[in-house]
């Protein structure tokens, strides 16, 4: 998945974009830039059960960002032999942002990894 942030109107253009590794979240107009993640949780057992689905996020390695952090979670009850769908709503500027070394909230450009259990999905944030 690739999400593109355009210089106008989402963010100001200050020369070439090729050298940017992040942008200030406060300088963007990315309200409403959302996407959903849907996952099916299947209970292969013969008893009803509950499960916590943990969504982790690994940003690009810049600004001393954490290697992995918990983004969200859902608790789901799944009947024996049944499947339940879990949905996460991701706000790009809120959920995919990091804080740099001086405390400024930034949106890192490049490859972001979303993890649920052993499943990983990569998405790329870039400026066009």
Image: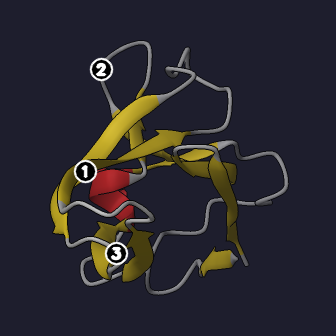
Along the viewing direction, whichever of 61 and 82 lies nearer the viewer: 82
- Residue on which disc 3 sits: 30
Q: Residue furthest front?
A: 46
- Here the colouring is secondary structure
Assign the C terminus to one quadrant of the image: bottom right
Along the viewing direction, whichever of 55 and 30 lies nearer the viewer: 55
Could you tell which of marks 1 and 3 lies nearer the N-terminus?
3
Could you tell which of marks 1 and 2 lies nearer the N-terminus?
1
Circle 1 or circle 3, nearest the eye: 1
Do callouts 1 and 3 mark residues in contact (Cβ within 8 Å)?
no
- Residue on which disc 2 sits: 103
Residue at image point 49% right, 20% down: 66
The numbered mark at residue 51 is 1
**Left or right: 122, with 13 as reference point:** right
Residue at image point 45% right, 65% down: 44
Residue 39 location, x and y as percent? 44, 74
Up-down relation of residue 115 to residue 82 (above or below) = above
Residue at image point 66% right, 37% down: 60
Task: Tell me the SS state at disc 1.
Answer: strand
Distance of label 3 from label 2 (alpha carbons): 20 Å
Circle 1 or circle 2, nearest the eye: 1
Are there few (<14), some (14-19), or many (20+) residues within 10 Å of tag 3? Answer: some
Up-down relation of residue 52 to residue 89 (above or below) = above
Up-down relation of residue 6 to residue 67 (above or below) = below
In this rendering, does residue 16 appear at all?
yes
Could you tell which of marks 3 and 2 lies nearer the N-terminus?
3
Assign the N terminus to one quadrant of the image: bottom right
In this rendering, does residue 109 appear at all?
no
Do callouts 3 and 2 mark residues in contact (Cβ within 8 Å)?
no
Are there few (<14), some (14-19), or many (20+) residues within 10 Å of tag 1? Answer: few
Residue 79 location, x and y as percent? 20, 73
């Amino acid at each position: 998945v690739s999400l593109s942030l355009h210089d106008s109107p989402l963010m100001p253009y200050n020369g070439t974009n090729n050298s940017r590794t992040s942008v200030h979240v406060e300088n963007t107009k990315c309200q409403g830039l959302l996407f959903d993640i849907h996952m099916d949780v299947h209970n292969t057992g013969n008893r009803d059960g509950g499960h916590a689905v943990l969504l982790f996020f690994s940003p690009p390695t810049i600004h001393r960002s954490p290697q992995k952090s918990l983004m969200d979670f859902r608790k789901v009850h799944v009947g024996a032999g049944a499947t339940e769908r879990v949905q996460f709503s991701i706000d790009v500027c809120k959920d995919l942002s990091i804080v740099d070394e001086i405390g400024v909230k930034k949106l890192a450009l490049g490859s972001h990894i979303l993890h649920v259990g052993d499943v990983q999905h990569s998405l790329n944030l870039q400026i066009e």
